[in-house]
Image (cartoon, helix red, strand yellow):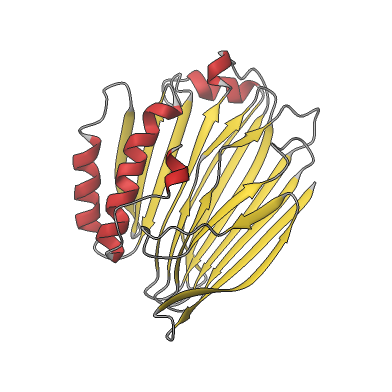
Amino acid sequence: MQGSLDIRFLSDAALAGTRLVHLDQRAPLRALFPHCSNMGLPVAAITTTCGGLTGGDHLSLAVHMGQEAGAMAVAQAAEKLYRSTGADTRIDVDLHLGANAWLEWLPQETILFDGARLRRRTRLNLGAGSAMLAGEMLTFGRQARGEELTHGLVRDEWHVARDGKPAWADTFHAAESDLVAALYHPAALAGARASAMLMHAGENLGAALALVRARLQQLNAQIRAAATIVNGILLVRWLGSDSADIRPGFAQLWMELRALARGLPANLPTFWHV
């Protein structure tokens, strides 16, 4: 399958808010626009209509935020990556923010079945004065079935730029025997079955970091988490035995950071919690 999705938002003074100005979608990708009156900005719910991805599938997603526009793009449900016979599943994400724009790229879990082969690249370009929240959540194996990953590929890349100049990059890459080793090595995932990352770019990051670290101290001892600031970008990471253990803390921080950064309601769309 070759699916694509291109969404563009612009600030509209007449509406005193943001409006959708462009939407191009090709199956299996689709964007829905639920009425979320408690979010303070437009919400685009992104879904794949095929029920999961496998080797050879390629998805391309792009979100463009015009100057001073604000919106949330949220995964409608967890994404399943099935076993591949050899070809890779490729996902390319491009996020562009104009001057003083705001975007929330809110994930749900990417569930890797045994033998899945994922290559995902997320590129963000931040304009002057723009800010955003972005994240990812990975689940290694179907936990309800006690599945272990014995082979496959995970390559997850992030590239962040400010006005086209590189600001931060990160890549997790492990394949076949190296993937199994990374899942259990004490210097890597150390047996964790789920991981998550939250990234926040914007102003007043010192206060945001203090808030995040205070919340992380309240986590269950079975969850490992840490936060830092790298080149003006706040990064938070979690490792746990189950994504269900990570989600509450992830959601709490997301809600508090959107309120701190932009004065938005400390809420998430109702369907994200289901």
From what the image shows, is residue 241 above or below residue 199? above
Camera-side residue of 34 and 28: 34
Furthest residue in direction top, as rendered? 146
Give how far across and how far down residue 9 sits, in percent.
53, 72
Relative placement, left or right, of 122 versus 30 is left
In the shown orientation, is residue 198 left or right of residue 10? left
Question: Within the image, what quadrant is residue 147 found in?
Answer: top right
In this rendering, the answer to whether 1 lies above or below 68 is above
Q: Position of residue 69 (x, y in %)?
A: 45, 74
Most extreme residue toward the bottom is 14
Residue found at x 61% / y 39%: 155
Q: Residue at x 58, y 22 (%)?
A: 142
Residue 226: give x, y in percent of width and height. Answer: 30, 38
Q: Position of residue 133 (x, y in %)?
A: 40, 56
Q: What residue lies at 59% left-to-right and 25% top-to-bottom? A: 179
Nearest to the observer: residue 23 or residue 113: 23
Q: Which one is nearer the viewer's eye here, 258 or 167?
A: 258
